[in-house]
Image (tube, grey):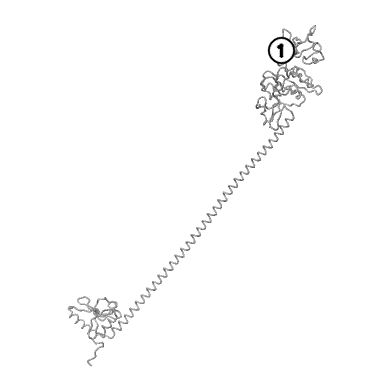
């Protein structure tokens, strides 16, 4: 099945064009007698014009056709799609030719659209069979190398290369209705900030827009590649879509706004971070200030305690000094008192000595002998056996008297000095020469009369013999 054939006179004819693309009527080739020798442009085998049960005009190979003719093996769907594309191109006011081979044979367009005024060319490829991304990209480049735009059109349920090369997926909405573009076209919704798939665009409308440059195949911004589909009730990932300049501008505007928002958010974050840092810094400053204040307080306390200790030590030193001074004064006073006492004692001793001198002066040696004789007599009457006297050199210890002994035992003291009686034992016997002397002793109150023994010796030396 093919839509093109070679006419022996006019050359290439097109079953999809009303004038067969060369001013001829369909009846000039269909069911003519004699038959016109039409041939297949691909394999050169004979073909004849036919009309299908659905009123589709086409050329069929004559019997005995070669198996390797590419057109022979093309499906009805493929042909119908090519026909639909050619029809849409012509409706847009462009010329459409089917199965056109490029100038150097690197491509053959299913439908080649030509703008006769501008000279622009746009290839429409019906691609129903599987093809790799690499192959379809390579084939696309061959068109572009010849300054020919291209759009790949598929009716498959799944079109993996739909955003790899300029492509759309078309769907048949139902019996007798025109094909619609179900995937590959999108519009940008600025309010929602996303692309929405345009899923009910008529194929003819799409072709018109594409030819006029109103539909453009463009890369989608990297942040907008999840495209909402109302049909799927979900998102599709698309790196590129067919869309309008208006949508592209809207996406660019949205991207700018998002970048501004990003910058604003980043600034907010930085501001927040700075504020946080400042808060931390303030907290740290406060902590350091408090620590500094505490250190000052501790230092002040140390100084206060040191001053207190110093004051206390000074006080103690004063007290120690005071105590020492007191002690020294006490010692001095004690010393002075002791000295005074010693002076007093010496004075008394001197007095006693002087008194003793005076006491003994009136007594002559003869008188003392008489006195001793009386004492000896008295003691012998008392039973004494061996009476003797200590040295006549009197001493303060014996109160300046002369000690008398009987067989070494003290029996009394002769005539002690009345001023020195306090030096004698209380029980010692005192011998006096006469009553007057005895009275001198008892009158002192230091000795009782029973301890005093006196004689009747005269006061003065007796010169009675005269
Ligand atoms: Zn052929």
**Residue 202 appears left or right of 385:** right
On screen, residue 160 above or below 249: above
Residue designated by label 1: 72
**Furthest residue to the top?**
34
Residue 254, located in which quarter of the rendered image? top right
Residue 61, located in which quarter of the rendered image? top right
Residue nearest the observer in this picture, 374 or 29: 29
Residue nearest the observer in this picture, 286 or 410: 286
Residue 204, located in which quarter of the rendered image? top right
Residue nearest the observer in this picture, 175 or 16: 175
Q: Residue at the spot x=24%, y=89% of the render?
A: 462
**Residue 329 appears left or right of 216:** left
Task: Find out if the beta carbon at label 1 lies less than 8 Å from the nearest ligand 1 atom.
Answer: yes
Q: Residue at the spot x=81%, y=13% of the render?
A: 25
Label 1 residue SS: loop
**Residue 278 appears left or right of 148:** left
Q: Quadrant of ligand 1?
A: top right
Residue 132 locus on image (x, y percent): 66, 21
Residue 245 locus on image (x, y percent): 74, 29
Residue 421 locus on image (x, y percent): 29, 79
On screen, residue 429 above or below 309: below
**Can the viewer see residue 390?**
no
């Amino acid at each position: 099945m093919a839509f093109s054939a070679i006419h022996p006179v006019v050359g290439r004819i097109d079953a999809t064009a009303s004038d067969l693309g060369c001013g001829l009527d369909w009846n000039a080739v269909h069911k003519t007698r004699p038959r016109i020798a039409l041939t297949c442009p691909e394999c050169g085998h004979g073909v004849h014009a036919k009309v299908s049960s659905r009123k589709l005009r086409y050329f069929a190979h004559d019997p005995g056709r070669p198996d390797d003719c590419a057109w022979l093996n093309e499906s009805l769907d493929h042909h119908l799609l090519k026909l639909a594309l050619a029809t849409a191109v012509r409706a847009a006011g462009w010329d459409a030719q089917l199965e056109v081979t490029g100038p150097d044979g690197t491509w053959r367009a299913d439908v080649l659209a030509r703008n006769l005024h501008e000279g622009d060319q746009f290839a429409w490829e019906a691609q129903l069979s599987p093809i790799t991304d690499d192959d379809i990209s390579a084939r696309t480049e061959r068109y572009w190398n010849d300054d020919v735009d291209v759009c790949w059109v598929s009716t498959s349920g799944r079109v993996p290369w739909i955003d790899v090369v300029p492509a759309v997926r078309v769907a048949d909405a139902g019996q007798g209705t025109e094909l619609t573009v179900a995937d590959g076209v999108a519009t940008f919704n600025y309010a929602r900030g996303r692309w929405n798939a345009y899923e009910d665009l008529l194929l003819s409308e799409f072709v018109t827009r594409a030819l006029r440059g109103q539909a453009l195949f463009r890369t989608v911004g990297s942040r907008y590649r999840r495209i909402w589909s109302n049909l799927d009730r979900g998102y599709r990932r698309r790196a590129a879509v067919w869309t309008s300049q208006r949508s592209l501008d809207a996406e660019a505007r949205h991207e700018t706004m998002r970048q501004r928002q990003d910058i604003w958010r980043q600034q907010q974050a930085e501001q927040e971070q700075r504020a946080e840092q400042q808060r931390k810094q303030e907290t740290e400053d406060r902590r350091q200030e408090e620590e500094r204040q505490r250190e000052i307080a501790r230092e002040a306390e140390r100084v206060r305690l040191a001053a207190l200790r110093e004051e206390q030590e000074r006080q103690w030193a004063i007290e120690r000094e005071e105590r020492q001074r007191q002690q020294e004064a006490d010692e001095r006073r004690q010393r002075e008192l002791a000295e005074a006492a010693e002076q007093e004692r010496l004075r008394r001793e001197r007095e006693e000595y002087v008194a003793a001198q005076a006491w003994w002066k009136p007594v002559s040696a003869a008188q003392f002998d008489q006195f001793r004789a009386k004492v000896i007599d008295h003691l012998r009457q008392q039973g004494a056996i061996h009476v003797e006297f200590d040295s006549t050199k009197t001493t303060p210890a014996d109160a300046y008297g002369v000690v008398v002994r009987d067989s070494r035992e003290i029996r009394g003291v002769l005539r002690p000095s009345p001023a020195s009686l306090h030096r004698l034992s209380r029980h010692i016997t005192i011998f006096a020469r006469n009553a007057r002397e005895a009275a001198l002793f008892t009158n002192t109150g230091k000795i009782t009369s029973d301890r005093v023994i006196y004689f009747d010796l005269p006061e003065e030396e007796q010169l009675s013999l005269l």
